[in-house]
Amino acid sequence: MTKGRMEAFSDGVIAIIITIMVLELPVPHQASVQALRPLVPKLLSYVLSFVYMGIYWNNHHHLLQAIRNVNGAVLWANLHLLFWLSLAPLVTAWMGETHFASVPVVAYGVVQFLAAVAYTILVRTLLKSHERDSALAQAVGRDVKGKISVGLYLVAVLIAIVQPRVSCGIYALVALMWLVPDRRIERTLAR
């Protein structure tokens, strides 16, 4: 299978996830700014998840630019990532609906943690199917930022049990870390 087909499928799934998330936002029934006030938690959780989807889409695209082919293991690793990303609309809506209550914030963090782990598995699976000195291997390197992200998710999940808003701040911090697309692949491919 070509990498283009996997990339197109992944793009479609991420687009559907974003569409589902926005459709979960209720429409105010009044034409005033005050009508938006009750929606603030839902809007904030949507913005956070939209940014995360954008980050995954962007980095997934860059990742696939550094490879030549895909195999069955890569396809399954990619589906594993898409599975965890597909749970984003559920936990996003739940977190916003409950005004960032502890259990939904924990669930959100668990989904983010498992998506990050799945992305790491995808990268490792791709690395196994390419040479040790491939552009992908050079670009990924030690992936310090990825490891820090996984650790921060774990910390945030534990903190969410008693301080869910602090955990939301940590989730936002991780998103900010990745807001600038991962340039390692672009730099490696430009060489």
Image (spheres, rainbow, N blue to C red):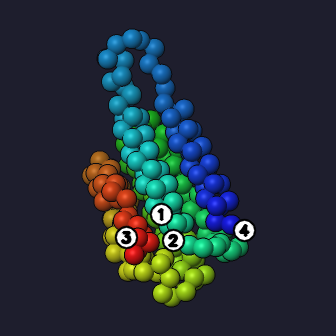
Mark 2 to mark 1: distance in Å? 7 Å
Q: Which residue is mark 2?
A: 66
Residue type of the residue flagged with mark 2: Ala
Residue type of the residue flagged with mark 3: Arg
Image depth: mark 3 or mark 4 in front:
3
As helix, strand or loop, the secondary structure at mark 4 comes to: loop
- Of the two numbered discs 2 and 4 on the same chain, state the one appearing first in sequence: 4
Whether the residues at callouts 2 and 1 have beta carbons within 8 Å, the answer is yes
As helix, strand or loop, the secondary structure at mark 2 comes to: loop
Q: Which residue is mark 1?
A: 62
Q: Which residue is mark 4?
A: 1
Mark 1 to mark 4: distance in Å? 19 Å
When the figure is inspected, residue 168 is found, relative to residue 184, above or below; the finding is: above
x then y, percent, for residue 169: 28, 51
- Of the two numbered discs 1 and 4 on the same chain, state the one appearing first in sequence: 4
Q: Residues within 10 Å of mark 2 (few under 14, many from 20)?
A: many
* Image side of residue 13 versus residue 39, left or right: right
Q: Which residue is mark 3?
A: 187
The residue at the point 63 percent across, 54 percent down is 8
The residue at the point 39 percent across, 11 percent down is 31
The residue at the point 35 percent across, 31 percent down is 40
x then y, percent, for residue 41: 36, 35
When the figure is inspected, residue 29 is found, relative to residue 19, above or below; the finding is: above
Residue type of the residue flagged with mark 1: His
Q: Which mark is residue 33?
A: none
Mark 3 to mark 1: distance in Å? 11 Å
Q: Quadrant of the C terminus?
A: bottom left
x then y, percent, for residue 170: 30, 56
